[in-house]
């Protein structure tokens, strides 16, 4: 769903009029800005890792004798905690897996790693004699949902109608003559959210291993 349809459908659900506000109109701006706020809400839905925001990449910087490696924090929102989410492919061909933990658990040592202040931080610094030195770090992560920019932007939410109903509910709630519509619109959005989560959980089958998948996305310097 593109922005024009999102605006038109949201306005119709909130107001009951088929003709949406024109680009630049105050109501258009209210609907558009509300949509971007709710995209953030969807992205950060508690207890849900959206598979559509999952990706994997390999750092251009090889492993050196340190415990921290910068990543692009404008792209990486959180690390995946699934099996084989972070691993190092050594120069001798061996692959070393690391467990993704909270930063506060790094003090337990061992093969643990966390995302901290825009860096991959390992529990222990690599020694110069480690087989990992010179190796490549690959990690899986969940990125940020792209914001709407203009009429050509596509709604990033898995089921766009959730955003339609949420934007409509917000718009209706600001008008005392239509405030009574908001609860029903939110109820419809909640039903769609339930469906989205169910579909996402089916895609996120824990028995599936991505294996030796080779990243096609950009690498981070």
Image (spheres, helix red, strand yellow):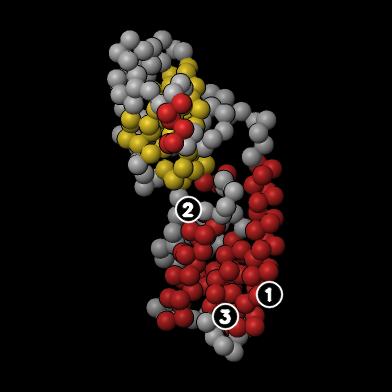
SS at circle 2: loop
Residue occupying the point 61% across, 28% down: 209
Report whether residue 106 is seen.
yes
Question: Residue 166, how many percent across, how many down?
Answer: 58, 69
Verify CB contact (< 8 Å) between mark 1 and mark 3: no
In primary-sequence order, the first of circles 2 and 3 is 2
Q: Observer-nearest residue: 57 or 68?
A: 68
Question: How far apart are labels 1 and 2 at the CA level?
Answer: 26 Å
The correct choice, above or below, for 91 with respect to 192 in the image is: above
Verify CB contact (< 8 Å) between mark 2 and mark 3: no
Q: Observer-nearest residue: 126 or 159?
A: 126
The correct choice, above or below, for 141 with respect to 74 in the image is: above
For discs 1 and 2, the disc positioned in front in the rendered view: 1
Label disc, if present, on residue 145 of the rendered structure: 2
In primary-sequence order, the first of circles 1 and 2 is 2
Label disc, if present, on residue 172 of the rendered structure: 3
Residue occupying the point 44% across, 45% down: 77
Kindly identify which residue carries mark 1.
Answer: 184
């Amino acid at each position: 769903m593109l922005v024009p349809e999102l605006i038109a459908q949201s306005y119709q659900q909130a107001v009951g009029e088929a003709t949406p506000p024109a680009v630049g109109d105050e109501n258009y701006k209210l609907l558009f800005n509300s949509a971007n706020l709710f995209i953030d809400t969807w992205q950060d839905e508690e207890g849900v890792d959206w598979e559509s925001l999952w990706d994997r990449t390999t750092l251009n910087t090889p492993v050196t004798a340190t415990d921290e490696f910068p990543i692009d924090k404008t792209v990486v929102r959180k690390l995946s905690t699934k099996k084989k989410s972070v691993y190092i492919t050594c120069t001798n061909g061996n692959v070393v897996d690391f467990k993704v933990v909270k930063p506060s658990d790094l003090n337990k040592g061992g093969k643990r790693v966390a995302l901290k202040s825009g860096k991959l931080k390992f529990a222990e610094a690599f020694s110069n004699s480690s087989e990992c030195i010179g190796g490549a770090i690959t990690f899986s992560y969940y990125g940020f949902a792209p914001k709407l920019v203009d009429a050509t932007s596509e709604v990033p939410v898995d089921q766009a109608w959730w955003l339609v109903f949420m934007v409509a509910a917000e718009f209706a709630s600001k008008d005392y003559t239509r405030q009574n519509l908001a609860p029903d619109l939110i109820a419809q959005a909640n039903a769609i959210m339930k469906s989205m989560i169910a579909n996402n959980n089916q895609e996120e089958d824990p028995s599936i291993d991505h294996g030796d998948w080779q990243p096609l996305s950009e690498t981070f310097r």
